[in-house]
Amino acid sequence: MAELTESGSGFLTSEGIKSALESGRLVITPLLEESQIGQASIDLRLGSEILVMKQTQKAFINPVELTPQTARNIQGPVNLAIGIPFILHPGQLILGVTLEYISLGLDLCGMILSRSRFGRTGLIVATASFIHPGWKGCLTLELCNAGVLPLFLYCGSPIAQLAVANAYPPLENQPQALIPTRPRLAEMSKMIDWSKLKKFQGIWEQQGSFLTSTATSLNSDNKKKE
């Protein structure tokens, strides 16, 4: 494989996609039809399993407390049968998964985009759209109906598209991560940001106490002078 240069980075057109598939840098399977490869993207189909929000007594979702267990309490799996639609109601959010298994080489990255023909009916696809180099698995798709009428979603519908780009310079090592084949439950309780924010909160509270104490002292001195 020719070494990538900075000037060679960019999104792949159809010939570049086909070349990456032939060389194994890019894997997309099953690719049911060659027509899924467009001018600069590959159509991706909706898989057979989705996650739906449950109607619970919880008044809110707190990301700090969102563990796998709490996620299972608010989201439940639904299997899609061929030819039988799932009705996505206005304002409803579900998690779907691609029918295709995808593998990106260490020198490739990607973006998931909505298809305009579905977008015109109100369907928003993949709000978290960037795919890192070396990623492997079936992609979780965030699907939301932003329209005013219910939408029928069918297993196998080509609702999204994958744009692939060269990543420069390529990663040196394969990222170590689970390979998902089903919609992934949200889990945010272990995000390092929360511990950083908590530390910042402590510093802020200490500074706030100091400023309050200083202001009180200054006010007291001003009153004595008066």
Image: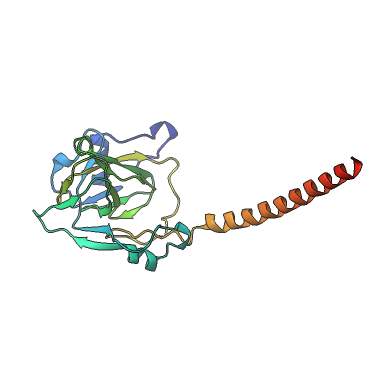
Furthest-left residue in this view: 83
At x 89%, y 40%, the residue is 226
Q: Is residue 47 left or right of residue 73?
A: left
Can residue 14 be seen at all in this image of the molecule?
yes
Which of 27/177 is in front? 177
Which of 64/82 is in front? 64
Furthest-bottom residue in this view: 69
At x 62%, y 57%, the residue is 199
At x 73%, y 53%, the residue is 209
Figure colour scheme: rainbow
Q: Position of residue 135 (x, y in %)?
A: 35, 52
Residue 147 vertical position relative to residue 31 in the rendered view, above or below: above
Q: Can you tell which quarter of the image residue 170 is in?
A: top left
At x 43%, y 40%, the residue is 168
Report the quarter where the N terminus lies: top left
Q: Can you tell which quarter of the image residue 130 is in?
A: top left
Can residue 155 be seen at all in this image of the molecule?
no
Furthest-top residue in this view: 7
Q: Position of residue 131 (x, y in %)?
A: 36, 47
Q: Position of residue 136 (x, y in %)?
A: 32, 55
Q: Position of residue 124 (x, y in %)?
A: 27, 42
Q: Is residue 143 left or right of residue 7?
A: left
